[in-house]
């Protein structure tokens, strides 16, 4: 009886993504791990085994997300204004006014998002006056769709000590109108003073952070995500994750990227101030194994670093190429010193010059003998053709977030600041895969509206907008296949995050992290793939999400209802 399984799935279509057992009809789970398949699995059933008849349903490993900000998403869901970036200014201000009416006079209106394409419209005294009126005198701070830029109203600017004569901070800009008056639009580091003021006047407890992180994970479960990498972790978030795991409430594999630098969040401490605590904050399901470096900004704000200039006449200086947040020597110091301690790095790059700098620096790290450290070029929408082969040569992962580049608000904003022939050449995924590079899929949620991997998978295969709201295709020659796209959100992510020892495939001995889907993605039209939903999510052999709880409670359907062997 010692070999008796705790859980047995039967009569299913189970894609394990394990090379030795690619597709099976039954799977056994014991002690939270995959035990066996097929006849061996069914033989492991005993009196205490819970048996689930899948009735032909489709099962696969839990999805993974190599790049998100789950706690921020949880905060937005629980505590903040949460509007899509497609809103017009009038619609956004209407939502702000509705939110403000529910708050006390001194409470902050916080959240977002405003679309990057609204930047010029917001940068005026008239827009600021309308913002002030909508908030009724309450302080307010709204993030844009990239979460790099802010819009603060007059009361928030006053509390942060920002006026017409306040100098631009290093790495950012306080926008002003033609007469030199501040408009509340804060680019990159320009928003840090307000973020720090907000944190001081409205401090967030570890308990609230843990609640927000747990809520973010609940939402991820509803999309079938059982493991992820938080792309910009603070010490406070890591403490919250440790608290959740110690209480038995962290139901996902979480890899954190400790912020080495910061010019958008106002995080404190940074760098070594976080790293010194990492060993004490490691737990069963939390792995603080990466640092996060913001090496440039975002193209619509002119802060992404490019080899060739932005368009002229769009508000940037002539021959403007953007720039990196640190010189090459500083980046090298960070990557060398962390590699020596077994710490990997995720590096934010949205321009091809920053991508090249990372590759050049990793080449030095590899030559120094540090072959185990993992490196992610995060976003990397633009890669110079001469650099594509270097990803595989240097074992650098392309961390991609399809929602940020397929036809939509952000792609349209980028097209206004770059020449058309360059703006249309985003995400060379086919070329990267053909050279043997590893691509790992992330949502960058809540920069993206949702962490729905199936929308990302559809975008990778079709190069189209899964919502259908934005027409056309973006560089269709770079489309990849459905099996490749699914691996980008499972096995590839697991390798990139360093959790392939426990998850990413349903291999014997690995964590029993699996999802039951509404459809088999291989048996439906590609146009239906974005509409696939998760019926159940299981983590370590425990059901953590059920889309039909009331039905399961009554057993009315007769399918997927637990039985006893």
Image (spheres, grey):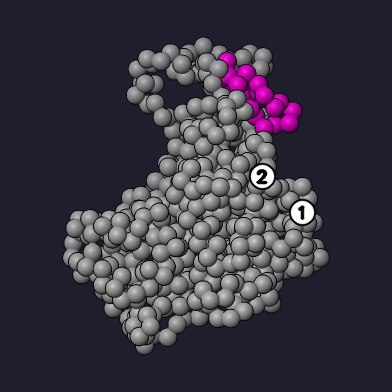
Q: Residue 392 shows which numbered tag? A: 1
Q: How many marks do you count on the picture? A: 2
The vertical placement of 463 against 389, above or below, is above
Give residue 326's position: percent from left, percent from top: 61, 76
Report if residue 91 is visible in the image: yes
Report whether residue 349 is seen.
no
Residue at 26%, 72% in the rendered image: 129
Q: Nearer the viewer, residue 254 or 126?
A: 126
Residue at point 23%, 64% (across, down): 134
Q: Specify start and end residues of the magenta stretch as a single range.
A: 9-37
Characterize the local packing of mark 1: few (<14), some (14-19) or many (20 or more) Cα atoms within 10 angstroms: some
* SS assignment at label 1: helix
Label 2 secondary element: loop
- For residue 28: magenta? yes
- Cβ atoms at labels 2 and 1 below 8 Å apart: no
**Dominant SS type (magenta):** strand
Query: Measured from the top left, where is residue 153 in percent x and y?
Result: 30, 71
Name the one closer to the observer, 175 or 15: 175
Q: Quadrant of residue 206?
A: bottom left
**In the image, what residue occupies the spot 44% across and 49% down?**
449
Labels 2 and 1: the sequence-earlier one = 1
Left/right placement of residue 227 relative to residue 187 reads right
In the displayed structure, would residue 297 be above or below residue 491?
A: below
In the picture as drawn, the residue positioned furthest to the bottom comes out as: 165
For residue 66, above or below residue 512: below
Q: Position of residue 72 (x, y in %)?
A: 42, 55
Q: Which quadrant of the structure image shows residue 178?
A: bottom left
Give residue 234's mark. none
Q: Residues within 10 Å of mark 2 (few under 14, many from 20)?
A: many
Q: Disc number at residue 479?
A: 2
**Residue 305, x across and y down, in percent:** 61, 71
């Amino acid at each position: 009886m010692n070999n008796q399984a705790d859980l047995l799935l039967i009569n299913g279509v189970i894609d394990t993504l394990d090379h030795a057992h690619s597709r099976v009809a039954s799977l056994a789970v014991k002690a939270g791990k995959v035990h066996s398949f097929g006849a061996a699995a069914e033989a492991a059933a005993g009196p205490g085994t819970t048996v689930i008849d899948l009735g032909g349903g489709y099962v696969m490993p839990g999805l993974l997300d190599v790049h998100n900000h789950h706690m921020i998403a949880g905060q937005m869901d629980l505590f903040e204004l949460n509007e899509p970036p497609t809103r017009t200014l009038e619609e956004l201000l209407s939502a702000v006014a509705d939110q403000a009416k529910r708050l006390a006079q001194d409470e902050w209106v916080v959240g977002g998002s405003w679309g990057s394409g609204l930047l010029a419209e917001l940068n005026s005294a008239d827009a600021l006056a309308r913002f002030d009126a909508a908030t009724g005198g309450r302080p307010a701070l709204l993030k844009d769709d990239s979460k790099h830029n802010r819009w603060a109203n007059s009361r928030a600017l006053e509390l942060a000590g920002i006026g017409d004569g306040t100098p631009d901070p290093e790495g950012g800009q306080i926008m002003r109108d033609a007469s030199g008056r501040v408009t509340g639009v804060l680019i990159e580091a320009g928003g840090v003073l307000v973020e720090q003021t907000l944190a001081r006047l409205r401090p967030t407890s570890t308990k609230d952070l843990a609640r927000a992180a747990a809520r973010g994970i609940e939402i991820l479960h509803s999309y079938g995500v059982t493991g992820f990498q938080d792309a910009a972790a603070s010490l406070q978030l890591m403490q919250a994750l440790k608290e959740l795991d110690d209480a038995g409430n962290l139901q996902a594999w979480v890899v954190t990227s400790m912020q080495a630098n910061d010019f958008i969040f106002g995080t404190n401490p940074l760098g070594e101030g976080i790293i010194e605590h990492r060993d004490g904050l490691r737990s069963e399901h939390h792995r603080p194994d990466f640092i996060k470096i913001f090496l440039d900004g975002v193209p619509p704000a002119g802060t992404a670093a490019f080899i060739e200039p932005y368009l002229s006449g769009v508000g940037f200086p002539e021959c403007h190429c953007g720039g990196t947040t640190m010189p090459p020597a500083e980046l090298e110091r960070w990557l060398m010193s962390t590699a020596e301690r077994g710490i990997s790095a995720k590096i934010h790059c949205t321009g091809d010059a920053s991508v090249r700098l990372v590759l050049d620096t990793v080449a030095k790290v590899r030559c120094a003998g540090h072959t185990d450290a993992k490196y992610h070029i995060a976003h990397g929408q633009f890669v110079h053709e001469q650099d594509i082969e270097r990803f595989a040569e240097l074992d650098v992962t392309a961390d991609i977030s399809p929602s940020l580049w397929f036809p939509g608000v952000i792609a349209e904003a980028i097209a206004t600041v770059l020449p058309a022939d360059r703006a249309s050449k985003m995400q060379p995924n086919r070329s990267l895969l053909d050279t043997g590079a590893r691509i790992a899929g992330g949502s960058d949620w809540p920069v993206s509206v949702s962490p729905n991997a199936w929308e990302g998978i559809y975008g990778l295969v079709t190069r189209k907008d899964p919502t259908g709201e934005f027409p056309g295709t973006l560089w269709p020659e770079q489309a990849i296949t459905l099996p490749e796209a699914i691996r980008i959100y499972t096995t590839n992510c697991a390798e990139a995050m360093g959790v392939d020892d426990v998850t990413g495939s349903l291999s014997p001995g690995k964590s029993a992290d699996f999802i039951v889907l509404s459809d088999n993605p291989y048996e439906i039209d590609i146009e239906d793939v974005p509409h696939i939903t998760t019926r159940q999510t299981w983590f370590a052999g425990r059901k953590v999400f059920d889309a039909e709880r009331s039905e399961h409670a009554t057993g009315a359907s007769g399918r997927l209802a637990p039985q006893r062997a």
